[in-house]
Amino acid sequence: MNDDTVLCLEEAKEGMNHAIFHLEKELQKVRAGKASPMMLEGVKIDYYGSMTPLDQAANISSPDARQIIVQPWDKSVLGLIEKAILAANLGFNPKNEGEILRIVVPSLTEERRKELVKRARTEAENAKISIRNIRRIANETAKQLKKDGTPEDEVEKLELDIQKITDEFSSKVDKIIEIKEKDILTV
């Protein structure tokens, strides 16, 4: 294999790894009934005139599987944090205890679990679409290499390798979503 074909394959792998990383990050936001500080990711507060991510204005911890504790660095923003969590429409009702907010994570209903599985599957399908798009771009690069004079047998091997890594990454997505579904559906 020449440098161009190796580079094409490496770029495809890198892109597909990024798709897997993004999928895992998105699935962390899909709660499975267990309290996690990640559940509050994306919540922003108006902190002295700028929209600030909650984790930059407070310590967020999960002492057990049923609750999340939010302890702001500045106690004066406790009310703002409470409003921001309610406005985020996450299904949480934070309890203001003066210095901290305590969030009791409700148990998931069967219907809610099915909704979460559906959402997780959508994220998995998005990851597979990204992987297929990366494959398409890599195959276009391979065709261009052929036009630019790379030997035909080398380009064919490159295309086979591209399909092989595409299959590997699609399989990874399937395994990740299978684990997440079990996690969500386990009561």
Image (cartoon, grey):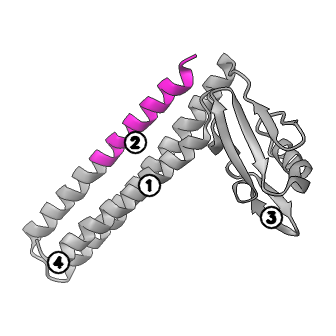
Q: Main secondary structure of the magenta part?
A: helix
Q: Which residue is mark 3?
A: 51
Identify the mark at residue 19; answer none if there is no mark.
1
- Between circles 4 and 3, the one closer to the viewer is 3
- Between circles 1 and 3, the one closer to the viewer is 3
Q: Earlier in the sequence, mark 4 or mark 3?
A: 4
Q: Which residues are magenta?
A: 168-187
Q: Position of residue 18 (x, y in %)?
A: 42, 58
Task: Give the farthest residue toward the bottom.
Answer: 148
Label 3 amino acid?
A: Met
Q: Residues within 10 Å of mark 1 (few under 14, many from 20)?
A: many
Residue at the (86%, 61%) spot, across then down: 46
Q: Is residue 38 above or below residue 138?
A: above
Spatial distance from mark 3 to mark 2, Cα to Cα? 34 Å
Spatial distance from mark 1 to mark 3, Cα to Cα? 28 Å
Label 1 amino acid?
A: Ala
Residue at the (70%, 54%) spot, across then down: 55
Residue at the (71%, 59%) spot, across then down: 56
Residue 35 is left or right of residue 150, and the answer is: right
Q: Which residue is mark 4?
A: 3
Q: Is residue 130 above or below residue 36?
A: below
